């Protein structure tokens, strides 16, 4: 598949708004009055990605991810694989992290990956609207992993 560059319907990329004073800063990652009820987080986690390493590409059937990129330097890749979507076939690449701190909302069916393009390990926060592996980790994981497929159409261009 040949991907066109552009914006993807349903993906939100918002500036990481900070409130500063003489002690430092604070940022709101989510508020119930900022999200639809379907996107309320069910869990939250912090992940570290080693320099030069990638996570994904993968997608979810039902889960919406809400990533906070605020530390380090990442290249974020998004592909709209939702047949019937107005932006089906669109790929979006955004550099995010310290120099472009953002909160990104990724709906189901949008394939996503990120690469730590910095020289140090870096952190990402995620507040998905579904529990990983369901209640008490007793359900199938809602993840379609593309990174291990040799003929995956979701390739990461690091130029």
Image (cartoon, grey):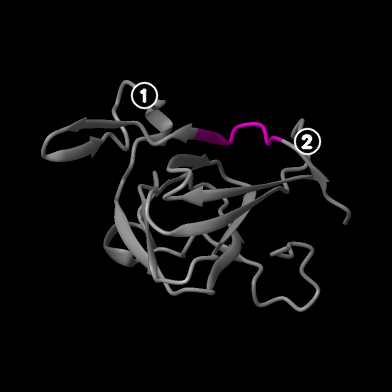
**Which residue sits furthest right?**
2
Label 2, label 1: how far apart the Cα atoms are: 27 Å
**Number of marks in picture:** 2
Within 10 Å of disc 2 (Cα), the crowding (few <14, some 14-19, many 20+) is few
Q: Position of residue 6 (x, y in %)?
A: 75, 37
Residue 102 placement, left or right of 159? left
Boundaries of the magenta span? 7-13
Q: Residue at x 42, y 32 (%)?
A: 38
| Rendered-image quadrant of the C terminus | bottom right
Magenta-colored stretch includes residue 10: yes
Viewer-closest of 153 and 15: 15
Assess whether mark 1 and mark 2 are in contact (beta carbons under 8 angstroms): no
Q: Position of residue 2 (x, y in %)?
A: 88, 53
Question: SS class of the residue under badge 2?
Answer: loop
Residue 84 numbered mark, or none = 2
Vertical arrangement, residue 2 with respect to residue 40, above or below? below
Magenta-colored stretch includes residue 54: no
Q: Residue at x 77, y 30 (%)?
A: 86
Residue 59 placement, left or right of 100? right
Viewer-closest of 41 and 15: 15
**Which residue sits furthest front?**
22
Q: Position of residue 63 (x, y in %)?
A: 48, 48
Q: Residue at x 53, y 74 (%)?
A: 53
Residue 48 placement, left or right of 115? left
Question: SS class of the residue under badge 1?
Answer: loop
| Rendered-image quadrant of the N terminus | bottom right
Vertical arrangement, residue 61 with respect to residue 154, above or below? above
Q: Quadrant of residue 8?
A: top right
Within 10 Å of disc 1 (Cα), the crowding (few <14, some 14-19, many 20+) is few
Residue that numbered label 1 is attached to: 34
């Amino acid at each position: 598949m040949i991907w066109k560059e552009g914006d993807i319907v349903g993906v939100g990329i918002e500036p990481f708004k900070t409130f500063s004073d003489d002690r430092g800063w604070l940022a709101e990652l989510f508020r119930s009055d900022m999200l639809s009820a379907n996107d309320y987080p069910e869990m939250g986690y912090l992940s570290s990605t080693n320099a030069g390493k990638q996570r994904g590409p993968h997608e979810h059937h039902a889960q919406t991810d809400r990533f906070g990129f605020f530390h380090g330097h990442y290249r974020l890749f998004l592909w709209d694989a939702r047949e019937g979507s107005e932006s089906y076939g669109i790929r979006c690449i955004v550099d995010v992290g310290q120099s472009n701190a953002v909160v990104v909302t990724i709906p189901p069916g949008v394939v996503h990956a990120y690469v730590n393009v910095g020289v140090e390990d870096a952190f990402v926060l995620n507040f998905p609207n579904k529990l990983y592996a369901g209640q008490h980790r007793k359900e199938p994981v809602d993840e379609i992993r593309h990174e291990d497929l040799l003929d995956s159409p979701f390739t990461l261009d690091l130029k």
